[in-house]
Amino acid sequence: MPISRIAIGGPGEASQPDALRAALAEFVSMLIFVFAGEGSGMAFNKLTNGGSTTPAGLIAAALAHAFALFVAVSVGANISGGHVNPAVTFGAFIGGNITLLRGILYWIAQLLGSVVACLLLKISTGGLVIPIHNETSAFSLSADVSVWNALVFEIVMTFGLVYTVYATAIDPKKGNLGVIAPIAIGFIVGANILAGGAFDGASMNPAVSFGPAVVSWTWTSHWVYWLGPLIGSSDRRDRLRHRLHWTEYPSAATHHRLLEMALCVQSLCFCQLRF
């Protein structure tokens, strides 16, 4: 990657109103995402008397996180870009789409948003733990899953997530495909939770792992949930798209059909939840 694409930012950028508004948007979006996503797991755990680690609990977690991230990205998209993930911010910095100083602001806001959401969940539920995995209040590995297994999972899942973010939200050639960016991002997170949730919790997001770890003060294998997503997000998505010769994009009619399909799938998901 050309060094010229990496921007540090001016010393006064941290105090600029638009940067502060963007950081606040990241804080609010992360709070919404973590509170709804992890809170739904706590509710499922309470209703089923410890059933959050069952197949039904995994499906509920995938749906809840997909819906919550869809909303969180949507509400922050026009202000901060709707990163809602330090790994996404890091990938945007590596790609030259955000300055280092603004990226640090985003990271601070995202981490604080996750911690505040977990504190609010602990207070509002009377001290219930956040059943992310293995009935603990922090991300952890399943039995017979090593840290290296989990690291590979996090790298691959985060690559899929950040590639989706780049293709639908960041790429200047995305065209009308940007309309479905939030739901596409939510879908890939939900799918990855179904794939990796039973093994390491399927974080893909250092901030989502950080909040529960701080509240419970549990740091076992926590580095996996930072190193994996950061490696997965640092790959050059623009170079890969160029090598795949994705230089011609679908027509406007195709984009409209994709949007209609996405909305139909969303409607079907809500119908399934109702019945």
Image (tube, grey):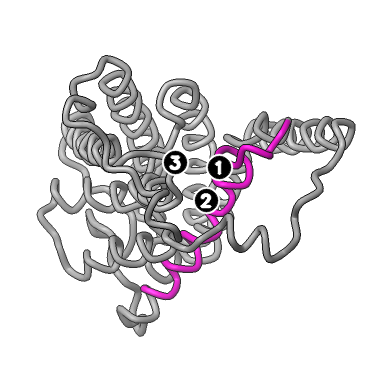
Q: Residues within 10 Å of mark 1 (few under 14, many from 20)?
A: many
Q: Residue at x 67, y 59 (%)?
A: 242
Residue that badge 2 annotates:
189
Q: Residue furthest front?
A: 4
Mark 2 to mark 3: distance in Å? Answer: 22 Å
Residue that badge 3 annotates:
97
| Mark seen at residue 186 | 1
Q: Secondary structure at mark 3?
A: loop
Q: Secondary structure at mark 1?
A: helix
- Amino acid of disc 1: Gly
- Amino acid of disc 2: Val
Q: Earlier in the sequence, mark 3 or mark 1?
A: 3
Q: Main secondary structure of the magenta part?
A: helix
Which image quadrant: the C terminus?
Answer: top right
Q: Residue at x 47, y 22 (%)?
A: 75
Using the image as rendered, state which of residue 166 and residue 11 is in the foreground.
11
User: Looking at the picture, how far across and down is residue 14, in whole percent?
Assistant: 20, 27
Residue range in magenta is 151-175
Which one is in front in this view, the residue at disc 2 or the one at disc 3? Answer: 3
Q: Residue at x 55, y 39 (%)?
A: 170
Q: Residue at x 31, y 48 (%)?
A: 208
